[in-house]
Image (cartoon, rainbow, N blue to C red):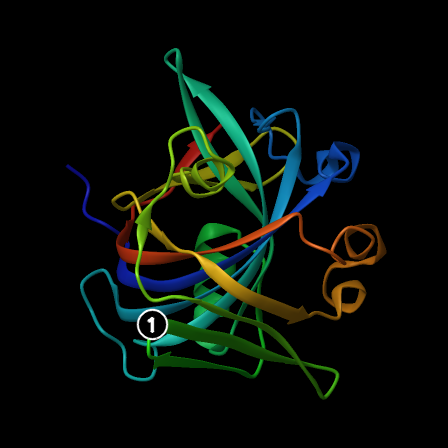
Amino acid sequence: MAKPFLTACWTNLLIANFIVDKKILEPYRPAHTELDAWNGNHYMSLVGFLFTDTCVRGIRFPFHITFEEVNLRFYVRFKANGVWKRGVVFIKELVPRRMITYIANTLYHEHYETREMSHAFRQEHDSLHVAYHWKVNGKTDFLQAEAALAKQPIAEGSEAEFITEHYWGFTMVNAAKTSAYEVQHPRWNIHPLKSFSFQCQAETLYGASFAEYLADPSSVFMADGSPISVMPKQTIS
């Protein structure tokens, strides 16, 4: 059995979801995949979370063990041997370390970008306060929420299940080739939200076609996260 390329814990995933016209996603859809949908809708998600206890091939690199990530992604699926593999495609992933950007873009053909970033977690009575911040053009963008401290299972057949139950990453290499990797983790729970706000210079980061849809999320939720394993990449051609 293959050993993971990367292991870590993903913590406090704050996920804002936006219903989009599939025509803006098609140019970014990797070869051999098809767009995935829930109740006939196609989604992008703006996701902030914290990496902790990060190891690459079993090695913990100083200053690269704990760090934030904020990504914009959409959802696809790929059929292999009659079985659907449901996964995500990243438009862009923001992280605060240049080495992470270099490794991910070079080895996995991803679209990482290095930004000044920070986070804040705070427990207060029965609430959990979570915030992610990143700098764009000298200004601070953010995702932030207050959620119930108590967790609950993700409901079967729900939108939250659709968003979280994608266990593959797919990346366009060229018009005929796709890079794929499995992300292994247990099923997550969610913290019911009490409030949410965000600010994102979407046109600067992602372009005008995406910014049009990144104004008002159709839903937001917070997943607790878990240990994860990113498996070695595969090539679909």
The residue at the far front in this view is 125
The residue drawn where x is 71% and y is 38% is 25
Q: Is residue 163 above or below residue 116?
A: above
Q: In this image, 111 relative to 234: left or right?
A: right
The residue at the far bottom in this view is 138
Q: Is residue 14 above or below residue 176?
A: below
Under circle 1, the secondary element is loop
Camera-nearest residue between 195 and 172: 195
Give how far across and how far down residue 104 sits, in percent. Answer: 46, 60
Give how far across and how far down residue 77 sits, in percent. Answer: 51, 28
Which of the 4 image quadrants contains residue 125? Answer: bottom left
Q: Is residue 183 above or below residue 15?
A: above
The residue drawn where x is 67% and y is 53% is 217
Name which residue type carries label 1.
Asp
Camera-nearest residue between 7 and 128: 128
Locate the N terminus and report the quarter of the image it occupies. Answer: top left
Q: In this image, 122 relative to 15: left or right?
A: left
The residue drawn where x is 69% and y is 41% is 19
Which of the 4 image quadrants contains residue 206? Answer: bottom right
Q: Is residue 221 above or below residue 146?
A: above
Residue matched to label 1: 126
